[in-house]
Amino acid sequence: MRIAGGSAGGGPGRSTRPVGVMAGVLVLIGCLVTGYAGQSLIEIGAPSHVSVSAGVIGSSGGIGNTQPVRVRLQVGVVNSGDAQVRVVGRWSDTITTAIRSLTPSVVEVPGGTTAEFAVDVALACTWPDELTLPTLRLEEPNGEEEPLQISGASALTDACLRGVPAARPIGVISATPIPSPRTAENQNTQRQDGRLELVLNSPTGRKVRIVSLKAGGVPLTMTSDRPGEPTSAGPSARLAEGSPTTLVLTAPKACPKQWLITGVPTSLRLELASGSAPLVQIGRPLATWLLATACAADGPS
């Protein structure tokens, strides 16, 4: 009875144990396969982080009588992402600037690195519209192409200022010291009152806003008969409003030390709202005015 009972009771117990172990093994293998497959999908399908910016870091050219002028822009690309991207050419031009070639023609930028290349452009300095940069074509890791904007359009203004006078965005019409009114004590001598009348225009008709100006690195107080928007440095001046713009400059109260070392300046550095800071030659009238006012032997007039 015990043998029969043991045989009857033990048979089913021995037969179900392998089935239970096998089921557990299958579940474990299934979990491993699922986990491995899921891991593979995550690794393969994870999107790459793409963060790319480009800007002009230098320019050359812009000289000559032919319009549009040829300008060579040195462009830097920063890839802050973790995957390699490529600059493969032009995406679109603008009304004032057209890309002629890239050197090299294809630029590879691995993740976390920077690259530099040259862009030859044709620049319409005489066109009255705002000077704007073209757009590059960026190839992402998945092969898709996107536009890549370039910053630093002020380099175009600088390039045009190196061109022929008719194409320059800022022209100097006159620079005249303002005399002080004659008084009973001063009938025979006409002294300057410390101000200079500077008349500028925009030969191309392009709108230009002057934020401030400096002479030899020294800021000069500026007022305008055609003020623009207020700035942190005071009112700005607008050009290309249909007629010349008159600026009245006030000489410093004393001759700055840098002028005593390097000499009285003959040019002005104009700081524009676009971020450009072109150097405009005034010549002898500026130097003569400063020598008669801030740097006069007997002190400012």
Image (cartoon, rainbow, N blue to C red):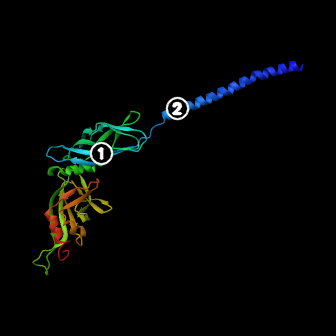
Residue situated furthest left in the rendering: 188
Residue situated furthest bottom in the rendering: 185
- In depth, the one of 138 and 133 nearer the eye is 138
Give SS at disc 1.
Answer: strand
Q: Which residue is mark 2?
A: 40
Question: Which amino acid type is marked by label 2?
Answer: Ser
- In depth, the one of 91 and 180 nearer the eye is 91
- Give the class, few, some or many, for how many residues have Cα within 10 Å of label 1's Cα (few <14, many ≥20): many
Residue 173 location, quadrant = bottom left
Point 27% across, 54% down: residue: 276
Spot occupied by residue 10 in the image (x, y as percentages of width and height): 81, 22
Q: How many marks?
A: 2
Point 27% across, 42% down: residue: 118
Q: Quadrant of the N terminus?
A: top right
Q: Which residue is mark 1?
A: 75
Spot occupied by residue 236 in the image (x, y as percentages of width and height): 27, 60
Question: How many angstroms separate mark 1 from mark 2 (CA)?
Answer: 39 Å
Residue 179 location, quadrant = bottom left
Q: Is residue 128 visible?
A: no
- Give the class, few, some or many, for how many residues have Cα within 10 Å of label 2's Cα (few <14, many ≥20): few
Point 77% across, 22% down: residue: 14
Residue 252 location, quadrant = bottom left
Question: Which amino acid type is marked by label 1?
Answer: Val
Lower position in the chain sequence, tag 1 or tag 2:
2
Rendered view: 231 above or below 95: below
Spot occupied by residue 240 in the image (x, y as percentages of width and height): 21, 53
Give SS at disc 2.
Answer: helix
